[in-house]
Image (spheres, rainbow, N blue to C red):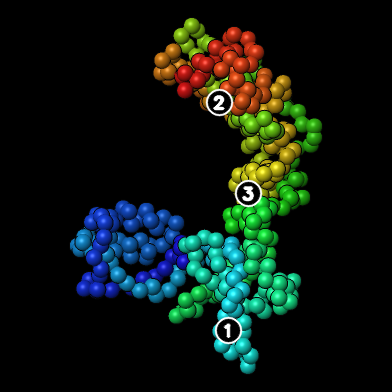
Amino acid sequence: MDDDAVAVMLDPVVYETKLRGSNDALTSEESTDSTKDMDSEEAVRALKTIGATMSCNPSKRPAGRVLSIIRSSPRCGVVIGLLALNPWLPKGEANGRELDYIQLIPIDSKLPMMVITVESLPGFAKERLINGDVSIEREMVAARIEEWKEGSDCPKAQVIRMLGRAEEIEPQISAVLFEHAIRTTDFSSDSLSCLPDAPWKIPAEEYETRKDLRNTCTFTIDPASAVDLDDALSFERVSQKEFRIGVHIADVSRFVLPDTALDREARIRSTSVYIPQHKLPMLPPELSEQACSLVPGEDRLAFSISWDTDDTGNITGRWIGRSVIRSCCKLSYDDAQDIIDGGFEVDVSGKRDLNCMGSLS
C-alpha cells in the first residue's frame, strides 16, 4: 500500500535491474530525511545501506522482496470507492458454505481493487443487494482494509458507511470529510467549559501590559460573508517618506490555555474547514465569531508585527508583540479592489494608503 513502512530483503547485485532516468545515487542525507517520521535507527541504517549500494552501482536499481509491514499506511483505514456487483466473485468454501464477494473500486487510482463479503455489508445495504437493487452500485461507500493475505491479488475490505449517490454533492462532501478524518461533531461540553463568560470584556491589566494600537488605522479584508475575522492590516505614515505597515492576528492564546480540553480539541481539528453553505470551525463560535473576531469598533486582543519602511520598500525597523487593536472597517475583497480601481467612494488619504500598501508589497 502507498505509505506503508516495510522491511525489505535486498537481492544480490546480479539481480538488480538497469536504472532508467537519472543515474544520481541516493545519498545518506536523502536516506535519513526519508525516514524522519519512522523514528527507527534500524530503518535509517537500512536506507543508508541502500544508498551505499547505489553509489557503488549507479547504473542499477536495487531489487528485493518485502518481508513484512512494519507500520501500515493510515490509508488502510480510509478507502472511498464504489461497489461493483457484476459479476459477484465466488471465493471458495468456508464452514461448509460458499461466501459471496463483491468488488470495491477505490476512487484513488493508487489503491488496488478490493473485495467485500456480502455478509459483512451493513444490514440495509445487504437487504437491498439480496432484493436485487443494483442501484447500490451508484453509491459511494467508506471502507477500511481488514486483511491482505500473502499471495492474494486483492485486499479484503469492510464497508463502514454508505455515503450516498456518487453524482450528488452531499455524498461527495461526506467522502472528502471522511477521507481526511475531519471532525464534524459538535464541541464537547468539556471544551465549551473552557470558554470565558459572555459577554466578555478585556480586563484592565491587558490594557496595561499590551501596546495600545487602537488609534491606528486598522482594517480587515475577508470574503463578504465572513464573520470570523482573525487577521487585520494597518498602515501609518510616519513621515513623508516613511511608512509603518502592521499585521495583526487575533490572540487566541489568551483564551485557549495549553493542554486544556479546548486546546486538545483544537489540536485534533487543526484548522477550520469551509465547504459549500457550511463551516466546520476549529474553535467554538463564541471565540472565532465573537471574542476573537476583529470586528469594527470593538477592542480586541491581538498579536502584532509592524515594519517601518522607506518609500522604496526597504525595512528600517520592526516591532513584534501583544497588542490591543480596534478595527475601523471590514472590507471584502471586492471592496478593496473597488477602492484601488476608483469605483468606491472613499477619502483621498484612504485610497492613497491602500495604493501605497499595494506598491510596497
Pointer 1 residue: 90
Asked if the residue under mark 2 is in contact with the one under mark 1, i.e. CB atoms within 8 Å, the reply is no
In this rendering, the answer to whether 239 lies above or below 173 is: above
Question: Residue 147, can we see it?
Answer: yes
Going from the N terminus, do you reach mark 1 or mark 3 first? 1
Q: Nearer the viewer, mark 1 or mark 2?
A: 1
Q: Quadrant of residue 330?
A: top right
Residue at left offset 21%, top offset 61%: 59
**Which label belongs to residue 247?**
2
Pointer 3 residue: 269
**Which label belongs to residue 15?**
none
Residue at left offset 67%, top offset 79%: 119
Rendered location of residue 214, percent (x, y) = 65, 18
Residue nearest the observer in this picture, 214 or 314: 314
What's the amino acid at mark 3?
Arg
Q: CA distance from mark 1 to mark 2?
A: 64 Å
Q: CA distance from mark 3 to mark 2?
A: 25 Å
Residue nearest the observer in this picture, 298 or 77: 77
In this rendering, the answer to whether 46 lies above or below 210 is: below
Secondary structure under tag 1 reads strand
Secondary structure under tag 2 reads strand
Residue at left offset 41%, top offset 18%: 314
Relative placement, left or right, of 229 versus 151 is right
Secondary structure under tag 3 reads helix
What's the amino acid at mark 2?
Val
Going from the N terminus, do you reach mark 3 or mark 2 first? 2
